[in-house]
Amino acid sequence: MEPISIVCAVFLFFSCHLQGSSALTPVFVQKGKDVLLEAMVADVPEDFDLLSWTFNKSDTLVTFSPVREPRVYDAYTGKVEPSVKNYSVKLKNLQEADSGVYTARLTRDREQTVAEYNVTVQDPVAPVELTVNSVSNSSDSCNLTVTCSTQDSHHISSTLTCDTKTCSQEGGERSKVTTSGASLLVYLVNDSIICNHSNRVSWTKDSKMIGEFCPRHAGQRTERYHVLPLVIGTVVAVIIIIAAVIVYHQKKMKKRKYETEKIENTVYAVPEVESPARPLVQSQADETSGPTSTYCLVGPHSEATGSTETRGNTLPDSLYSTVGKSSRA
């Protein structure tokens, strides 16, 4: 039973020791740049005693307290920018000597790690150059030997073989890790040879077109590339023509419908008979005398009766109308 007890005791010890610790987070920063390190705010209670950021477990950068402003230690004045809002710190203008482990530790009833970062400061990678050393053409293939080199004397060489359809890397090196931890790669993308130099914070590349060195390969690829735009252009033109025809017919149908509705909705005017216009000019007498009345008196004529018998025939009496103007009231 004693071995089991010892194992349990060791397990409990490490569990208590690691309780509250956070995982170590790797961070890569380019030399001369800034980086923001954040504490886990959810793990920070309101009534904590002290929260401190340290470098490599020994140097204290800054401390936070609920009762006073953050305190930046003299050695890091101007290099560290604290934030009261989330207890984070910004490290400014980092150099290679600033690489290391940055830890945020909280003190309350006990000490607890709330954030931990492994910061690595790297220089930007040097430019690269891709060189084609040799070319061998045959009736059905083309072989190239290329070298990808950096300004700091690192290089890799690779051999490529191309036919009229594809290219492949047949021999030599494809990748290499330099002493600074950067990667040097040679690879193919479509019709290009790429030489790439990169690390976690920067990258640079150089490239060559295969068609510059393998004409037969370029000719076949160029022909295919010329056919593709022609096909696309034809399809687009057909679509445009069809769309134009559809629009034309729609406008024509709409115009015909409009004319039909216009005819159906036409209202014809009913002719009206105007009353005769009143004379514009009247005599002065009419205007001043007002309306007049005319009376007709009908009676026998006053001549002798003997004249009524002529040639043996009796003639009817003649009636004459005497028209006179009535006297004005």
Image: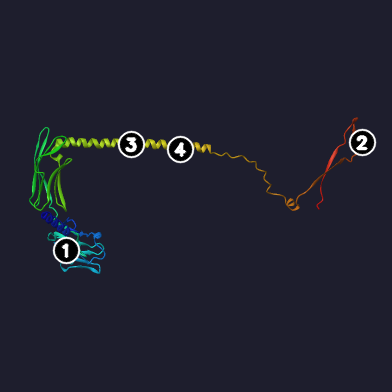
Type of residue at label 2? Answer: Gly
Foreground residue among 156 and 324: 156
Residue 314 at x, y percent in the picture:
90, 32
From the viewer's perspective, is the residue at label 1 or at label 2 nearer?
A: 1
Q: Which residue is mark 3?
A: 239
Type of residue at label 1? Answer: Thr
Q: CA distance from mark 1 to mark 4?
A: 82 Å
Could you tell which of marks 2 and 4 lies nearer the N-terminus?
4
Q: Which residue is mark 1?
A: 54
Q: Which mark is residue 147?
A: none
The answer to whether residue 91 of the structure is visible from this angle is no
Find numbered disc 1 in the image and state the secondary structure of the residue it sits on.
strand
Residue 215 at x, y percent in the picture:
14, 37
Q: Which residue is mark 2?
A: 306
Q: Which mark is residue 255?
A: 4
Q: CA distance from mark 2 to mark 4?
A: 93 Å
Find numbered disc 3 in the image and state the secondary structure of the residue it sits on.
helix
From the viewer's perspective, is the residue at label 3 or at label 1 nearer?
A: 1
From the viewer's perspective, is the residue at label 1 or at label 4 nearer?
A: 1
The answer to whether residue 299 of the structure is visible from this angle is yes
Type of residue at label 3? Answer: Ile
